[in-house]
Image (cartoon, grey):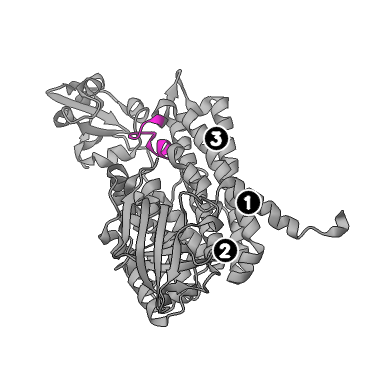
């Protein structure tokens, strides 16, 4: 914007017929915006012709200026804007807004240049394609668009979300910023944490979470080569959708208590499946359901069930957005070929449990990042909000709250990185053997951190933390939805107990 105006010129435009103001040394003409202003015309008339920088930043984030950049007509003569704008895909300069490995002055033993290249490409992708859709879909309860699924499929982000492995071979990963051979769990951590920057908890799960936790069972346990290859290709290409259907109303976290029954037909060629599933993420639009069933009185099995005759899905209203596609499923005498059995009959518990470590680890990655995003919101707000003539950050009680939040976020990220390093050095079998306890305890402590961080953030934002729009919308969203992470994938109490029980198996008798 090349036009320059003196402050005296701006001051003359102080009526509803010609209403100008200054924000961060930029001059805005709000005359035609008066009727469209969400807060009404009175607020604008109060700052007409003045420097409204303090008033603006006491109510809004800088992004609002970007949103209404077409209202800017120039700058104040001889003055330059002071607020630093983050470029699309760029790093956040706010202290502790990025993990230590991404902060320029620090180093890390875990992350290489390929990790940094992937992070930059992922952030660009999320900023440009995911965040805008997520914000709209979260508010309106819309399901993920096929266009976004296709974008993630064509760049192989869908494949990368399943972690390192053979499924990546021969694929070009996000413009070639990392090769399939070098892709490891730290790369996957980056993909997960960058995707969380959509800041929409319901859409976060709606963004193909069912595929991420359901497809590994097919990749690892489907014994029919043609079926396995076809389903994997259909799902990773975005042509078909898939979800994991384990939980039932009677069972909850008690996987062994499943009541959905699969009985073989007399000719032994099919299973007939009847029962119900509840709280199934992405179930509303899934074409396949990786389903836990009972095949004998004490035997559980896993089955791939295509959507078809006898499969009925109904949406479930939860405390987060319908964008997640949370579903109640009814299977009414569904006929499925025997080659859709995953693993061995009556040994499905092994299949069910096999991916729990990875699922919980992914949830930890996401929760740690969301906690950091909330911390960033609180740091920004504390530095711009004026109360009793002072910024919030000048109040010792606020600094104490921020110190607690920073400590929890950084400690959790450090433990996550330590566990992730162990994952890069272990086979999938060894991860199940040695990391089930540590990952369970890690998820437990991270969701406890979410509880504390959400609580402190609400107190910092006050009434705005109870409002779904405006300054506090991210905090409102998190305080309303963080409990999903404390329940899904294994509740806090069960995982805490698992961690201790796993440790006790290694307790040396000599110490008694």
Nearest to N terminus: mark 3 or mark 2: 2
Q: Is residue 489 above or below residue 341?
A: above
Around disc 1, counting alpha carbons within 10 Å, would you say few (fewer than 14), some (14 to 19), or many (20 or more)?
A: many
Q: Secondary structure at mark 2?
A: loop
Residue 474 among magenta residues: yes
Around disc 3, counting alpha carbons within 10 Å, would you say few (fewer than 14), some (14 to 19), or many (20 or more)?
A: many
Q: Position of residue 316 (x, y in %)?
A: 36, 46
Position of 104 compared to 147: left or right? right
Nearest to N terminus: mark 1 or mark 3: 3
Quadrant assignment for the N terminus: top left
Q: Position of residue 173 (x, y in %)?
A: 40, 70
Q: Nearer the observer, disc 3 or disc 2?
A: 2
Nearest to N terminus: mark 1 or mark 2: 2
Q: Nearer the observer, disc 1 or disc 3?
A: 1
Which residue is tagged 2? 298
Label for residue 441? Answer: 1
Residue 350 among magenta residues: no
Label for residue 402? Answer: 3
Range of residues picked out in magenta: 466-477
Q: Is residue 114 above or below residue 385?
A: below
């Amino acid at each position: 914007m090349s036009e320059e105006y003196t402050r005296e010129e701006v001051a003359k435009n102080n009526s509803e017929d010609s209403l100008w103001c200054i924000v961060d040394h930029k001059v805005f003409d709000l005359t035609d915006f008066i009727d469209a202003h969400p807060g009404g015309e009175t607020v604008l008339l109060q700052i007409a012709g003045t420097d409204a920088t303090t008033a603006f930043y006491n109510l809004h984030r800088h992004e609002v200026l970007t949103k209404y950049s077409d209202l800017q007509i120039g700058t104040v003569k001889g003055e330059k804007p002071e607020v630093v704008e983050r470029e699309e895909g760029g790093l956040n300069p706010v202290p502790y807004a990025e993990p230590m490995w991404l902060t320029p002055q620090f180093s890390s033993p875990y992350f290489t240049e390929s990790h940094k290249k992937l992070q930059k490409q992922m952030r660009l992708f999320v900023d440009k394609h995911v965040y805008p859709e997520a914000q709209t879909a979260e508010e309106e309860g819309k399901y993920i668009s096929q266009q976004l699924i296709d974008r993630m499929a064509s760049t192989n982000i869908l494949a990368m979300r399943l972690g390192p492995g053979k499924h990546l071979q021969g694929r070009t990963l996000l413009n070639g910023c990392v090769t399939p051979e070098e892709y490891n769990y730290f790369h996957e951590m980056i993909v997960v944490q960058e995707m969380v920057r959509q800041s929409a908890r319901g859409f976060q799960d709606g963004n193909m979470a069912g595929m991420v936790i359901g497809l590994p069972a097919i990749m690892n346990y489907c014994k029919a080569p043609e079926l396995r290859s076809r389903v994997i290709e259909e799902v990773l290409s975005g042509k078909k959708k898939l979800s994991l259907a384990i939980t039932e109303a009677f069972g909850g976290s008690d996987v062994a208590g499943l009541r959905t029954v699969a009985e073989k037909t007399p000719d032994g060629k099919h299973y007939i499946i009847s029962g119900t599933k509840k709280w199934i993420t992405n179930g509303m639009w899934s074409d396949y359901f990786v389903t836990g069933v009972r095949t004998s009185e004490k035997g559980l099995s896993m089955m791939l069930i295509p959507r078809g005759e006898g499969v009925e899905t109904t949406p479930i209203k939860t405390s987060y957005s319908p964008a997640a596609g949370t579903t109640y499923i009814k299977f009414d005498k569904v006929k499925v070929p025997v080659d859709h059995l995953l693993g061995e009959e009556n040994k499905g518990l092994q299949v069910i449990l096999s991916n729990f470590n990875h699922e919980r680890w992914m949830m930890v990655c996401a929760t740690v990042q969301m906690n950091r995003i909330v911390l960033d919101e609180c740091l920004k707000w504390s530095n711009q909000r004026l109360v009793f003539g002072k910024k919030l950050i000048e109040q010792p009680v606020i600094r104490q709250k921020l110190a607690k939040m920073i400590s929890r976020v950084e400690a959790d990220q450090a433990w996550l990185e330590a566990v992730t390093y162990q994952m890069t050095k272990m086979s999938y079998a060894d991860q199940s053997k040695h990391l089930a306890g540590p990952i369970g305890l890690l998820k437990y402590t991270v969701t406890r951190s979410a509880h504390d961080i959400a609580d402190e953030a609400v107190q910092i934002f006050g009434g705005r933390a109870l409002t779904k729009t405006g300054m506090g919308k991210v905090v409102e969203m998190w305080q309303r939805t963080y409990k999903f992470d404390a329940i899904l994938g294994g509740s806090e109490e069960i995982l805490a107990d698992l961690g201790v029980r796993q440790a006790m198996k290694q307790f040396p008798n000599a110490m008694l």
